[in-house]
């Protein structure tokens, strides 16, 4: 099982796909302890969840919001590196 902060490379099953078509997934843990693997292309936005800046809120393209146990700065550092 991947630790938070580890980016996994995943490929769809079936025919062989060129490496350029692989998509990286970012592992995050929500405030209830559930783990999620998110494709960066599925993320619409990220913001601070509260005034403490200890947690972040990820808005998905579906409009759903996910509260995670990482700060905005930590998430952005992982997404852009």
Image (cartoon, grey):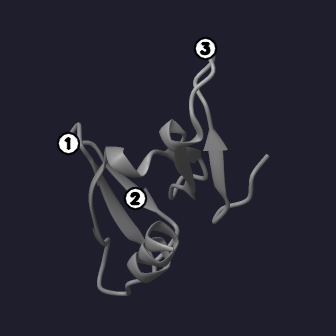
Between disc 1 and disc 3, whose residue precedes?
Answer: 3
C-beta proximity under 8 Å, tags 2 and 3: no
Q: Nearer the viewer, mark 1 or mark 3?
A: 3
Spot the residue most to the right.
1
C-beta proximity under 8 Å, tags 1 and 3: no
Label 1 and label 3: CA atoms lie apart by 32 Å
Spot the residue most to the left.
63
Reply above or below: 31 against 73: above
Q: Which residue is mark 1?
A: 63
Residue 70 percent coordinates (x, y): 51, 72
Q: Which residue is mark 2?
A: 67
C-beta proximity under 8 Å, tags 2 and 1: no
The crowd level at tag 3 (other Cα within 10 Å; few <14, some 14-19, many 20+) is: few
Element assignment for label 2: strand
* Count of all numbered marks drawn on residues in the image: 3
Residue 25 percent coordinates (x, y): 54, 48
* Residue ID at (61%, 52%): 33
Specify whether 45 is left or right of 57: left
Residue 4 percent coordinates (x, y): 66, 62
Spot the residue most to the top.
14
* Residue ID at (65%, 49%): 8
Element assignment for label 3: loop
The crowd level at tag 2 (other Cα within 10 Å; few <14, some 14-19, many 20+) is: some
Answer with the quarter of the image where residue 52 lies: bottom left
Q: Which residue is mark 3?
A: 15
* Residue ID at (30%, 77%): 50
């Amino acid at each position: 099982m991947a630790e938070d902060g580890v980016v996994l490379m995943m490929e769809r099953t079936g025919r062989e796909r060129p490496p350029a078509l692989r998509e990286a997934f970012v592992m995050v843990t929500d405030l209830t302890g559930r783990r999620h693997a998110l494709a960066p292309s599925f993320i619409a936005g990220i913001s601070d969840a509260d005034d403490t800046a200890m947690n972040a809120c990820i808005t998905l393209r579906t409009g759903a919001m996910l509260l995670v146990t990482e700060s905005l700065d930590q998430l952005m550092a992982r997404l852009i590196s």
